[in-house]
Image: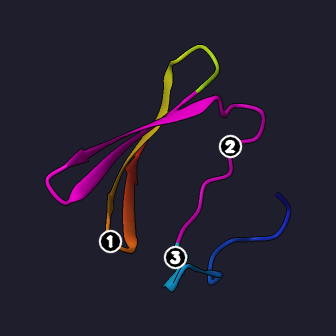
Amino acid sequence: MTDPLEGVEIGGATVSDAVVLNNQFGFVLMELVGEVWQMSIRDVEGEVILECEVDGNEATCFP
C-alpha cells in the first residue's frame, strides 16, 4: 500500500491510525471474549506480529 489509510472511512468508522505489514502477514486468529474480539495477527510461521482488541467500530492494537 502506498496511500495513507488515516482518514479513510471503512464500514462507517474512520481510520485514525494504521499499520501496514508488507510481506509479513500470514493469518489472523479472532476470539470473541464477551462483546470484544481479541485479534492476533501472525506471520506465516505462527509468530505474533500484532495483537488487537476490536470493540464495535474501534480497534486498539498492541505491538
Q: Is residue 45 above or below residue 41?
A: above
Q: Position of residue 12 (x, y in %)?
A: 51, 86
Q: Secondary structure at mark 3?
A: loop
Quadrant that contains the C terminus: top left
Q: Earlier in the sequence, mark 1 or mark 3?
A: 3
For the point 55% across and 79% down, which residue is it? Answer: 11
Quadrant that contains the N terminus: bottom right
Separation (CA) of disc 2 from disc 1: 23 Å
Q: Secondary structure at mark 2?
A: loop
Residue type beneath disc 1: Gly
Boundaries of the magenta span: 17-42
Label annotation for residue 32: none
Q: Is residue 15 above or below residue 29?
A: below
When asked about the image quadrant of residue 5, the answer is bottom right
Q: Residues within 10 Å of mark 1 (few under 14, many from 20)?
A: few
In the picture, measured across the screen, residue 17 lies left or right of residue 38, that is right
Q: Is residue 33 magenta?
A: yes
In the picture, measured across the screen, residue 46 lies left or right of residue 36, that is right
What residue does disc 1 label?
56
Q: Position of residue 28 (x, y in %)?
A: 51, 37
In the image, 45 versus 21, the foreground residue is 45
What residue does disc 3 label?
16
Q: Earlier in the sequence, mark 2 or mark 1?
A: 2
Q: Position of residue 27 (x, y in %)?
A: 58, 32
For the point 82% across and 70% down, which residue is it? Answer: 3
Q: Secondary structure at mark 1?
A: loop
Separation (CA) of disc 1 from disc 3: 15 Å
Residue type beneath disc 3: Ser
What residue does disc 2 label?
21
Q: Is residue 26 above or below residue 12?
A: above
For the residues labelled 2 and 3, say whether their Cβ atoms are less than 8 Å apart: no
